[in-house]
Each structure stands twice: as C-alpha cells, then as structure tokens.
Amino acid sequence: MLDEEKVEDVLVIGGGVNGTGIARDASGRGLSVILCEKGDLACGTSSASTKLFHGGLRYLEQYAFGLVRKALKEREILLANMPHIAHPMRFLLPLVRGMRPAWLLRIGLFIYDHLVFNRHLPPTRSVDLRSDIAGKPLKPHLVRAFEYSDGWVDDARLVVLNAVDAAERGAKILTRTRVVAARRESGLWKIETIDENTGQHRHIRARALVNAAGPWVNLVAEGVIGMGVHDPIRLVRGSHIVVARLFDHDRAYFFQNADGRIIFALPYEEDFTLIGTTDADHGQSPDLVSCSEAEIAYLCDAASEYFAAPVLPQNVVWTYAGVRPLDDTGGGSASDASRDYHIRLTDEGDRAPLVTIYGGKITTFRLLAEQVVAELAPYLELQGRAWTDHTPLPGGDFAFGDRTAMVSRLLGEKPFLSPRDARRMLAAYGTRAWQMLGDAKSPGDLGRSFGAGLTEVEVRWMMTREWARTAEDVVWRRSKCGLRLTGNEILALDAWMKGVIDENLAGD
C-alpha cells in the first residue's frame, strides 16, 4: 500500500528498459522510488527490439564512433552481469558483388573489434561458405563471409529483472497505473495516478520526477506535466517477423540490402528464425503499432535474396513491431536517425528536478540510468557510488560461459524436466529457477500444465514476483511460449489467471 503522506525521492514514468534501469540504480543507492507504467512492463518498444546487445556496426558508416564505442563498452559489462538472459553470438556477413566492398567491411570490422578492449568475444575472421555449415542454407553464389561477434539478449526479461531487482531494493513498481497529472508545488512534485483496472486515484508527492516514457515522452511532457516540448522526436517503427527455423546452427546472419539498409536473421527460441528490422517513419500514435503487410513482404524479399529456399509471407508464424523515439534534428532517412540518447534536466530554483529521456538503444540503458541518477544527485541524498556495472541481475550470479553447465546441473537435480524446459528456465530465471521450482520432484508437483512446458508453478511465480496479469504478459513477454501454444490454450491460461486474481481480490 502507498502512504500518500510520505514524500518519495523519485517517481519514474515508464516501465521500459530505461525506466526500470533508472528505478534499479536509484533504489540501489538508497533512494525511495516509485515506478508507474500504464500497461505491463516492457509492453512497448522494450520488448520489440532485435534482441541484441551490440555497438551497431552499421553506425560506423555514419561516423558515430562515440555511440558505437559507448555501446561496445556496455556490451562487455552487460554480458558479464546477466549470463542467463544474454549470451555472445557470432554473426556472418556474406560478401555480395555490388554491395559494400570487402576491404571496406574489413576496415569497419577491424575498428569494431578494437574500439574497446574485448574480454569476452572472439575477433572477426573470414569464412569460406562453400565448406562451412553456415553456407549450406544460402544461395550458392555466396562463397565468402566475415564472421564477427556481438551479443544476444532477451529484451523483455531484461526489463522485468531490472524491475525485480529494484523492488527487492525497496522500489514500488506500479504496473497498469497511469500518471494523469504532475505539477510542481511548494518545491515538490504532486502527482496524480489512476489504476487502470480499478479506476482508483492516488496522489503521490516526490522530490524528483523522471519522464522515461519512450515514444510517449512528449505526450507525457505536454499532456501530463503541462510543459512545452523542447526536443522534437522522430517516431521510427521497427518490425520483425518469425518463421520456422531456416538453418541448423547457432550463428546469425547480417544481410546487406540493395537499398542500403540491413537486416538480421537470428536463431530464435530453438525452433524458429527471427528476421528484422525495418526502419519506417511512424505517423500514428505509439499505441497503434503493428508490422504491416508491406513490411512483412519487405523482410521476406530481403531474406530471400540470401537464403536458397524463399522466405514467403505465408511462412510467417508471428510478427511484432515497436516504435523508437529518435532525435529529429538531423533529417535524412529513418535508418540514418541517431540511436544515441540525451538527457534534459530542468528544476524550480534548485528544487523539484524533472529529468526527461530522449532516444537511446537497449545496449546503453544501464549507462543512461547511471547518468540520470548522477544528474539527480545534487537534489537528493544518495547512499554509495555507482554500482550496477559490477552487480548481476537477479538469477545472473554464475560465471560467464557456464550456462551449459548450469543447465546440466538443473537437469541433474530436477530430472523430470525436459532438456528444452530446463534450457528455457535457466535462460529466463538463471539461478532462481531452483527457487521457483522449490521442492518439486515430479511434473505433478508443478500443478496445472498449460502447454509448451508452462505450468502453474511458473505462472504463479510470474504473477507474484514479476507483475504478470494476463496471458499476453506471460506468453509473449516473460516467455515466448506463445509460439508453441494454440489460441485455445492461451485463452484457457488467461481465464485461469483471471480466476486467481479474482480469488485474491475476494480474499482481500
């Protein structure tokens, strides 16, 4: 329960990766924090990425060396601190006549390898696609490629685990809670919220306010906070498609397109391939976003230029799209818009600071959060120094590179799990998989089965520890079990979850 008489240190608007990262950092330094998210955690842009921790190799063409270096440095930190939800991945960049020449790509990859000291990832190498298994699914005229390193991450789990850690350090995470008004009053922020489920209004006072609403940032600035827009943003939609697995190895592909853009084809959830992304200006509300038929066709056509077997729209089993709020001062194409972030701070006579976040990419969220808390330091009483660069996310307290050994250990101690389920649980929960499974000694101890290895024990964990409220929260964000569940199975899960919530409300 909230104490409306208490003055909180910070209220954060936005439950995406930036908002939860800020809440985690601030609460870990002794600040009282409330985070308000109008929907579910990661229900917007932060669950619609290409699932990569990367510097952005293509941004070198824009001479964005500072952004790439910053992101590559962060990539190293993140891979070390979340070995359950993130892991290294090798990428193959086939050479194509008429595209960027080999000498130019080699120089770019050399710079990419050496912008930062790299402890965890192997360097670039040349690959003969005629003899390497990676060449098998590709068209026969593709004979040579460069192979380089980057990182993969489960983006939605990243957001959820930041929120979990923030809550365990004292933060209050209020999902499905919309901030409807925020005004400075007597040196504090007076904030009004509404519970989207119950309609209940609350009033909160805070010393500092953070607008981390992502693509909604200027809508919040104008409609909620009542201030003018200082920084124009460009809403750029990135869409992805998922098809049945196109290749039998664990490396990814980086494909150049004739229009100068690029796409990735990534191994995904063991049985699938993820293809994306597009870059299209989004002229609608950020609430109205989906992968269009034109984007599906574009991604299928682009992938079919490389894969021997055509990728067709009827092969698509799932799509998703998100809107990125990018800097709108540079002009040019949507692909060329900067992915860097900037932070704007205003105050009222050295009191009631407001921090507004513009832009950013998932790889630099932790650094952004650290900088936001540093900006707030003169107004608040911090305890301790920056800490998130050397502290694992919940469940990530095992050594980098030990994921396979951890899966074997889980299977050894819980032999009733299938190898697939053990891999999925370790990749989602890390060492906390043991806590979730508890004393279970058989499948029957896990309660009702909803299909795709999803059981009552796990869903209750998501509901009680991770703020899940609907089947969509469970099967498309906290897991990707929706790829294997039928529509009726998802409906049955949703009905069961509503029943649990109703029981809890009745008990209260």
Image (cartoon, rainbow, N blue to C red):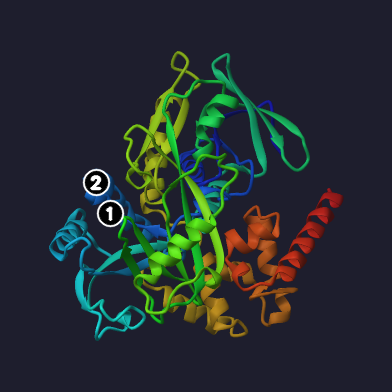
In the image, residue 282 sits, relative to residue 460, either above or below, namely above
Say what amino acid the circle numbered 1 marks: Arg
Kindly check if marks 1 and 2 are in contact, taking CB atoms under 8 A apart as contact: yes
In the image, residue 185 sits, relative to residue 171, either above or below, namely above
Disc 1: which residue: 58
Q: Quadrant of residue 105?
A: bottom left
10 Å crowding of disc 1: few (<14), some (14-19), many (20+): some
Percent coordinates x, y for residue 276 in the rendering: 43, 60
Residue at figure coordinates x 68%, y 25% from the top left: 5
229 relative to 495 in the view: left or right? left
470 relative to 36 in the view: left or right? right
Marks 1 and 2 sit apart, C-alpha to C-alpha, by 8 Å
**What secondary structure is found at the residue carrying circle 1?**
helix
Disc 2: which residue: 62
Say what amino acid the circle numbered 2 marks: Gln
In the image, residue 128 sits, relative to residue 22, either above or below, namely below
Percent coordinates x, y for residue 32 in the rendering: 55, 35
Percent coordinates x, y for residue 467 in the rendering: 65, 52
In the image, residue 110 sits, relative to residue 356, either above or below, namely below
Residue at figure coordinates x 65%, y 36% from the top left: 178
Q: Is residue 463 visible?
A: yes
Q: Name the residue furthest right.
A: 506
Residue at figure coordinates x 77%, y 67% from the top left: 492
In this view, the residue in front, 158 or 395, is 158
10 Å crowding of disc 2: few (<14), some (14-19), many (20+): few
